[in-house]
Image: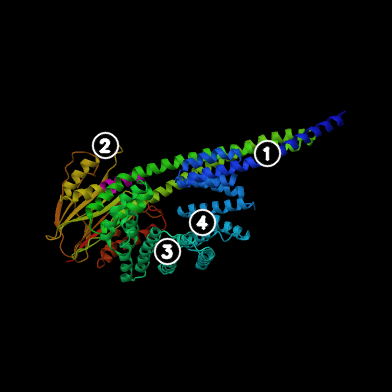
Amino acid sequence: MGKNILRCLSLVVTVAAALFLSGCGGDSEEQERQRREAEDMVYAAYLAKDYPRIIELVDSFKPLGSFTEGKGCYWLGYAYDRMMQKRMAELYWKTGIAAVENSTDDEDVRVYAGITNRLTGLLNTWTEYEAALKVAIPATERLKSLGRDTTSEYNNMLIYIGCCQSRLGLRDDKTFNSLEEAYNAQLNNIKKHPNAVTYRDAIIGVINISYNYLEIADYEKARLWLERMRQLIEGYKKQADARPDYAEKQLARYNIYLARALEGLKFKDEAAEAYRQFCQTDFFQTAEGKILASDYLRLAGRWQDAADNFGSMDELMKAFGTSYSLENIQQMLLKKYEVNMKAGRIDTARAVSMTIAERLDSAITLSRSAEAREEAAVHEKELEMTAENERNVRQRHISQLVTMATLIVFLIIYIIVRHRMGVRLAKAHNDLKTAYDQLEETTTAKERMESELRIARDIQMSMVPSVFPSVESIDMYASMTPAKEVGGDLYNFLRKGDKLYFCIGDVSGKGVPASLFMTLATRGFLTLASTGRGPAEIATRMNAELSDNNEMGMFVTMFICMYDLKQGRLEYCNAGHNPPIIGNAEGEYTFLDVKESNAPIGLWPSLEYVGEEMDLPSGNMILLYTDGLNEAENRRQEQYGEDRILQLMTSHASQSTRDMIEALKADTDQFRDGAEQNDDLTMLAFRVTR
């Protein structure tokens, strides 16, 4: 009886499986038609640059089987990359690699080459060079083993490998071999298929190599690759399907890159001629061209021309739809500030510095908000992908049950046990994944914060002047060393006719709040000094401004000076700061007897600050400093002290202001003996030499 039941069950299952398989075969032609239609629709969205549409189409077609897992992940990663969602693009491309990296199917290998090329480019753009090498090196090795080392994706990854290796300072012969192999492969491709497309692929690759060597200041190698770029452009122009506008733009790019390389090699006349040829092109008239030219102008010290070109920055940002992000502040606004400052365009530089001060806080907030939104989206997508994978697993189980129906009776107990174990394993997996996600989220947040603080420090340090007044009768130098990523110390100066203003300050607290308050104080000093007011009035007006709506109770101690270059007289106002050190022509140093020690700036409104004045004849020197100098501590918590400052300055009395400040920095560092710096250290020395 039992044997008959099993025999009947086996017959029914066999017939059902045959019908199931025959049904799949009959639908293959219809599925192929649907697959082609799906790919055509996605490609149309790609040509239209409609990236949300690509995502919508792929998400709707994938469950129908119109796209393989690998190809679907390729298009989704591409769309998110174009929408500047780096983490989401990286998630899909890594998922796509996992789906096809072990397949030898032609379509899967093409998808694998496309994804690894895209992901390598993404990581290289975000300066994650080690991560890019971890993707590109095994990918090129696999493609070469499969005989797929003649594709543009393979050549692109060789170029990325060489560029990443040079950025990481790895062996030069490794870099040379990768780049030469890519270049020779491109030449072979041109020889086999001489047309505009193959030439354009080669030109793009050589542009990336040339730009990479310019960025690492290896101008000799950059010049070699630029000559190859010129030859490729000439070859491109001879092709029947060449576009004259493309050739002209790339030739313009060649000239400005060549100017930069020649300037770096000290061939100034040849560099100037290359730049002149660049200026005669239509590309130079665009905002992109003018900003591109600024790298050469800055290297050549042509600050006036560079400042003129940066007038196109707002037009460029509008054309590309960019905003004042942290990266744009660092890469665009800071350069604009630098060139205008060195061109002597103080008003423009001050306006840029005010823009930086106004935009910095919101840029940090927007950066954090965007990162948080992308992190949340990535996390949600990971959960969706996990759920989808689980559904796919269940569907595969059902299919397997159909084909293995003859074993159901014998395996039913095993299936029940397996199911229970699967539930426990899934729970354990989810618990482990939750813990891992929490750890990854914490680590990512920490790394993001550290990156933001590094950018904030670069911005803060760039606003502190490093080029000092070139006045025949004056020797002036200053230095600032923050104790944390960002600090609250400040110094600055401004020449107004025959008056030279300079100041030093110390903001209460540490970190980003102190840095922002420091920026406001610096802006206030520069603005008021430019009106020609005296130090006491500057302090009074700054106090009125900074004490208004100061809910955090922050304040800044400052010592503000104005030196009359004709009269040799120094006016000053001490706003709660350390008294400076004064030295005479005989090398005798003592602390200045400050009679009017006013309150710090920012605490109480309506204060009237009182100033003082004194003669500062030839050979006399004044040192302004913050308490990071005299209160520097060693491992035994002993302070550096005022006596040690006077002793060191006396022993270095004949040296320049720069040498004296560097000596003080070196001596405090030696005194700390490895102890962590406990406060910002800022010094400004001013000596009359006439």
The C terminus: image quadrant: bottom left
Name the one closer to the observer, 130 or 476: 130
Which residue is under mark 3?
A: 237
Q: What amino acid is at disc 4?
A: Glu
| Lower sequence index among marks 1 and 3 | 3
| Lower sequence index among marks 4 and 3 | 4
- Please say whether residue 76 is visible from this viewpoint: no
Q: Are marks 2 and 3 in contact (CB under 8 Å)?
A: no
Coordinates of residue 21 in the picture (x, y in percent): 72, 39
| Lower sequence index among marks 2 and 3 | 3
Q: Is residue 44 left or right of residue 584?
A: right
Gap between marks 4 and 2, in whole Å? Answer: 47 Å
In this rendering, the count of numbered labels is: 4
Coordinates of residue 196 in the picture (x, y in percent): 47, 60
Coordinates of residue 93 in the picture (x, y in percent): 54, 48
Q: What amino acid is at disc 2?
A: Asn
As helix, strand or loop, the secondary structure at mark 2 comes to: loop
Q: Residue furthest top?
A: 1
Work out whether 58 lies above or below 243.
above
User: Which contiguous range is marked in magenta?
Assistant: 506-521
Q: Are marks 1 and 3 in contact (CB under 8 Å)?
A: no
Coordinates of residue 505 in the picture (x, y in percent): 26, 50
Graded by Cα atoms within 10 Å as few (under 14), some (14 to 19) or many (20 or more), the crowding at tag 3 reads some
Which residue is under mark 2?
A: 549
Q: Is residue 611 left or right of residue 673?
A: left
Which residue is under mark 4?
A: 130
Q: Residue at x 52, y 42 (%)?
A: 41
Q: What amino acid is at disc 1?
A: Arg
Q: In this rendering, which labeled residue sits more in front, label 1 or label 2?
A: 1
Image mark for residue 396: 1
Graded by Cα atoms within 10 Å as few (under 14), some (14 to 19) or many (20 or more), the crowding at tag 1 reads few
